[in-house]
Image (spheres, helix red, strand yellow):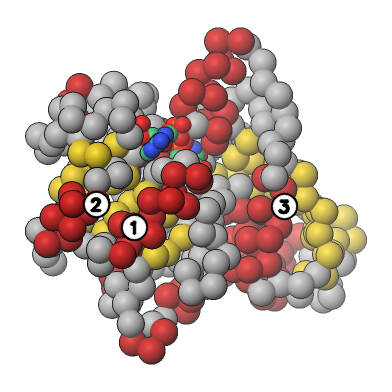
Amino acid sequence: MERWPTVVLGAGGMVSQRLQQRLAHHPWFSLAAVAGSARFNGRSLAEVPWILEEARPELPNLTVVDVEDEVLMARLASEGVRIAFSALPSDEAERLEPRWASHGIAVFSNASAFRRHPGIPLVIPELNPEALSLPAGKPHRHVCATNCTLLPLALPFAALNDTYAITNFTMRSEQGLSGGGFGYMQEALERGDVDPTIPGEAEKTEAELRHVLGWTGAAEVRCGRVMRADGHHVFVTVETEKPMTEEDASACLVRWSSQHVMPELPSAPHQPLMLVDRIDPTSHLHADGRQFKALDSAHHLSTGMAITVGNIVCETPHRLRFEGYSHNTLRGAAGGVIYLAELARSMEAI
Ligand SMILES: NC(=O)c1ccc[n+]([C@@H]2O[C@H](COP(=O)([O-])OP(=O)(O)OC[C@H]3O[C@@H](n4cnc5c(N)ncnc54)[C@H](OP(=O)(O)O)[C@@H]3O)[C@@H](O)[C@H]2O)c1
């Protein structure tokens, strides 16, 4: 398959570098350009400090271009750049993503600015791929990935809801520092503590769950930050219309998972859900749906793409507790948005 040239919006941030890492050897997409803010544009990509813990991958010899430059957007489009992967902060995304899209480059965004906007699909590949179906045959120019906290909730939630009809749920999260960006994480690590509050996060998570699943029950969602670099852990209790046992619920999650594999997509996890007895936030960080292993090569695109589910307890036949866990900058951001672009390309939706 021909590799489509892509541009990454944002040069030196956490999600931008995760995107660069995953695109370095991607079979369907290549890294043709990196467009940065004033702090890096005009500099060689090799001079941008590499902030991920894994070694800098072999990247093309690029000069970081200006993310604001309208002439450049037109030039990249004319040179065949098909996709812009956006790792911009929300305010910049609101201003800049429509400009990139207006040049015919399909923007796949990790920012919250356009989530739930009419005409802009908000998609989790296993849950609502139909949202990418073409409106009147016109290709999509702007697509959004969800909030990173939603992933470890939404996949097991959807599996249980399909079978047992969830009427209401409560969720509390413990979210890693990297979810706040590189500067935020560094400051917290230097200070040795963090403010546990995350303004607006619970509201976003609940609203996006309802949007993606079309679910309308009652919910109580609380989100909190903890002193851990990566990994978002959610603690969920669901109440259901139909009765279940712990064994049935576990079997339902395993069955749903095996029915939602997308082996044709390079970034798909081997299984979207990986069941364990108890979740360990350190050793379960890099779930790929088959095993837990760190990203030792950009060839391993499924690394960090599965949701780990554990600590399943059936409190009554109509009430179940479970925990979900996933890597916020992999499945929850860069890996997730590339996975989404793979789905859109396979559906000929862009
Ligand atoms: N971290 C996560 O787990 C996560 C998960 C899901 C979604 N997201 C979303 O992904 C986006 C990036 O987050 P991050 O974690 O990578 O943050 P980060 O580590 O703080 O990096 C900030 C990024 O924003 C760019 N940027 C900052 N000011 C800019 C400006 N004025 N104009 C253009 N670009 C500017 C930077 O580009 P330069 O390097 O070129 O300055 C950099 O790539 C945010 O919208 C965030 O909400 C993050």
Q: CA distance from mark 3 to mark 2?
A: 34 Å
Which residue lies at the image location 50% right of the left edge and 45% below the top edge?
91
The quarter in which the N terminus is drawn is bottom left
Give the quarter the ligand 1 occupies. top left
Pick the front one: 263 or 55: 55
Q: Is residue 31 visible?
A: no
For residue 187, what is the image quadrant? top right
Q: Which element type, helix, strand or loop, lies under badge 3?
A: helix
Vertical side of 212 occupied by 311: above or below: above
Residue drawn at 34 percent across, 39 percent down:
10
Percent from the top left, x then y, of residue 306? 48, 51
Check disc 2 and report its element: helix, strand or loop: helix
| Residue 332, position as x, y percentages in the image | 49, 48
Identity of the amino acid at label 2?
Glu
Image depth: mark 3 or mark 2 in front: 2
Judging by the rendered image, the residue that carries numbered circle 1 is 99
Q: Position of residue 288 (x, y in %)?
A: 42, 48
Amino acid found under the numbered disc labelled 3: Glu
- The residue at which mark 2 appears reads as 70
Q: Are marks 2 and 1 in contact (CB under 8 Å)?
A: yes
Say whether residue 92 is left or right of residue 307: left
Q: Place residue 266 in its image quadrant.
A: bottom left
Horizontal side of 347 relative to 58 (left or right) equals: right
Q: Residue at x 32, y 77 (%)?
A: 139
Look at mark 3 in the image and give the residue it sits on: 203
Residue 83 at least partly seen = yes
Name the residue nearer the viewer: 49 or 278: 49
How dense is the environment of label 1, judged by Cα within 10 Å: few (below 14), some, or many (20 and up)? some
| 284 shown above or below 103 | above
As measured in the structure, the alpha-carbon distance from the residue carrying label 1 to the one carrying label 3 is 28 Å
